[in-house]
Image: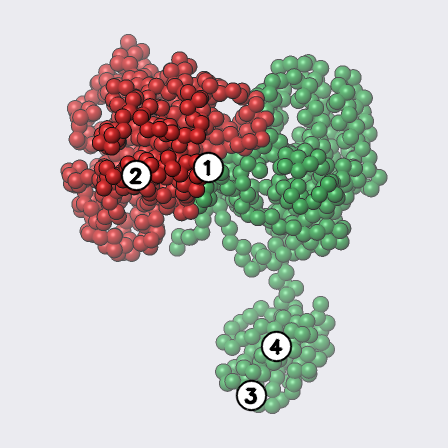
Chain colours: A red, B green
Amino acid sequence: MVSGVAQDTRLALPKGVMLSRTAEFLNSIGLGFEDYTSKTRIYRLRSQTMPSLCAKMLNERDIPVQVAIGNYDFGICTSDWLQELQARYPASNVVKVCDLEYDTAGIFLAFSRNASFTEDTLRDSDSTVRIVTQYPALAESAAYKMRLKKFRIFPLWGSAEAYLPENADLAVISAADEAALAAMNLRAVRKIADSSACIIAHREGLQTADFSRILAVFSSAFTGSGKSRVKTPAPSSVIDNDYAPAAANGNIWLALADGHQQVHTAAFLEKAGIKMQGYSKDDMRRRPASNMDGVNIKVIRPQDMPQQVANGNFDLAVTGKDWLLDHLYQFPSSPVVELADLGFGRVRVVAVVGEDVPADSIEGIRELIKSGKLTPLRIASEYVNIADKYLRDRHIARYRVIPTWGATEVYLPEDADMLIENTETGQTLARHRLKIIDTLFESTACLIGNRLSLDSTDKRAKIEKLVKIFRSIAG
Amino acid sequence: MESQRCKGARDLLAEDMERFRQVEDAFRNSCINWGYREIKTPTLEYIHLFTAAGTLTPAMLSRVYSFLDWDGWGGERIVLRPDGTIPAARLYSENFSGSKIARLYYVTNVFAFEETGKENREKWQCGVELLGDGNPTSEAEIIGLALEVLNTLGLAKASLKLSHAGVLKALIAELKLNTEEKADLLDEILEGNWQALSKVNGNKKIAAAVSTLMNLKGRSSGFLVNLAAMPGLSRSIVRELEAFAGVTGLLDTLGYKYEIDFTSIKGFEYYTGLCFKIRANNTKVCSGGRYDNLVGLVGGGNVPACGFALYLDELAAQVRPWSRQKAEKTVIVRVDSAGAESVKEAFKLSAALRSAGLIAELDFRGSQLDARWEISVQEKKPGYTVKDKIKNLQKKAADTNEVVNIIGGFGKVG
């Protein structure tokens, strides 16, 4: 678990949206890291002012878990992810050192502004209340506290607001304030928790080792000019979430990707002669319009699509084969099927170990485990179900899957022994001194559908028409 | 060697199981004799069975083992049964029409997470439910049944404590809190934090009544009659106190000793009336009470009901294992030669011993086994040597009948 020199203090820093303001904060207390920028290709950083301090860049959502298990002494993340971890595992070995005054937000339990019910009608309702969220543990305790009779929680990778009101009744969602919530077309039932950037620490480390030097540096954040060391405001990129109740009747629902896959999906649709309004960088809407008759479109995360097609919220979706397989491994009798291979977004899903590991195949890894090394084998992956099935089928005993939210390559070799990752060219892996020992499958974008929607004569014709267009372009 | 056993899980060894079965047998015999019939509910249930108000508290729900099933893409979670009564109420609501009286019992495991892993996360209960009868005689009946089982197990000094969820809920209602405050307060009390009551702002008279109730302990129904007559109590509280006195009056008549202590009950989430708990040797071994709303909450009609659970793990720890008794009846059939003829003889003799009500254990390896009787099978006639290891006697026998007779003659086998 310990990396390199034992005296090193290990700090986990956030990638992504928090990065620039966290860098600003660290600079303001004299703890800057030269390569801590969004353009960096180096994930291992060392402080210039404090040479015994080393840092790695992780997805902010993974930081509380990594600090709790002791891979890092300290971490900086927003406290919503800390609270989510503690709601799920109250005995987690992690404590908050202090709140920082940037990236402040609330975690809200929210309705759609178009919803016709109140908190009381929900509580008394005998039908199932559907809750979408990136915070399943916080949502669960909120639902218990509300005494909801029947509820289902749909854990999401993101874009929770898009599901309300058609596909869910409540969302547990982060927003800067109630105005930001309103901008997403939501209304607060109540605020569940406050959140802001914070410094967290591994509890046991804090109890046993001497961290007075770094803690003194952190404390300096609260003296002198103290407040607002971080001047840059958090970016707010709200995607229009307007809802038109009339549109839904008799139409089929198609889910399209937001995020990285959006550009590729938009290009594919254009090639297919489908004209879109509200599905481009400059004009993004949760419910874009198109020239396809009888089709309603919604924009959500590709990772969430297979389950949303399975439960009937969508009839069709454009996602990756990797996410389809991950879903099917979790739910083998799911009604989701692949209807067309769209050919773009080609990646390989591979098993990866550090260059220094004396094994070149999964059999080699099994031999290493037999000889008492690498046990239990720690596998970091975004694809929890794919990773689990892969290791189970290859009789690896014992192993632990560490779920991650991306940037997985940084985990090797200190924080994991193996990755199940996707790669386009293998270059990123090679740059991190990693090697591929197995290719699980090739993944491309695909059109998925629900077998049961195909049984409905109403929808069948519309679905088949769309599948035909998609296939002709991909073919 | 590092144990491969799951944290918080337990192996029950032969001696543990002997204790376990002893409790179970005493429980089953009493239940059958009182007219109760056995049921078994599945280990897996939907979580929503336990989430409705008045079933399990948020604190208990946060310790359930829940997961998505292999076909759980719809988001419906499954739990490992965290409680015995709620599934029994579901079984009743789905299989008994009207509000027919049902006397049901079961032996079941329940699952709840426990942080340290030093306590069991899987526990065993002997449960009794008497459904369809709202008369106080049913509380008296189940208390009598529970005490009988404890008596059979040699735990005659068990102490019975009583409280009443109806009285407590009526008190909380008088505090005039909003829905959320009320739920929070109830959750606190259910976790055993009675201090929470004193911190609530509101009606002074009620606060005085609360502290009276919390501090007094009584040993007869006269105590409750006195309480009901105290000034300042609302009609609904008095009504509940009178209902409570109705049950205790019956217990007085039947000669059951008890102590009334309103703070004695923790976790009465679904109880609506009388709650009771029984301690033996300073350990809680039983709890139960009346739960008139539960059947309705799990989809059935308005059915009054009451029941209790005996804590099997705690009781098993207090009874003596059977091994000694068993050794008395055990006969070791020892065969020194591995010849087919000897083996055949040994099997024949063992069968005869078993049909005479003895335990016959074969021994082809000359091991030291714990038993009163030992028989050596010889190839040569007369064939058998019978040893009584307690009385230190030895005798030869020519055939199986003679062996059985010798054992019968040496000592009475109980």
Judged left or right of residue A216, residue B346 is right
The kind of residue on which mark 2 rests is Lys
According to the picture, the residue beneath numbered tag 4 turns out to be: B350
Q: Provide the chain ID for the residue under circle 2.
A: A
Residue B379's label in the rendered image is 3
Question: How far, Cα to Cα, is label 1 from label 2?
Answer: 32 Å
Number of residues whose C-alpha sits closer than 10 Å to that of mark 4, classed few (under 14), some (14–19) or many (20 or more): many
Question: How far, Cα to Cα, is label 4 from label 1?
Answer: 57 Å
Question: How far, Cα to Cα, is label 4 from label 3?
Answer: 16 Å
Q: In terms of secondary structure, where does tag 4 sit? A: helix
Residue B75's label in the rendered image is 1
Q: How far from the left and from the top, in percent, is residue B259?
A: 74, 35
Image point (70%, 70%), residue name = B413
Question: How far, Cα to Cα, is label 2 from label 4?
Answer: 77 Å
- In the rendered image, the vertical position of residue A377 relative to residue A142, given as above or below: below
Number of residues whose C-alpha sits closer than 10 Å to that of mark 1, classed few (under 14), some (14–19) or many (20 or more): some
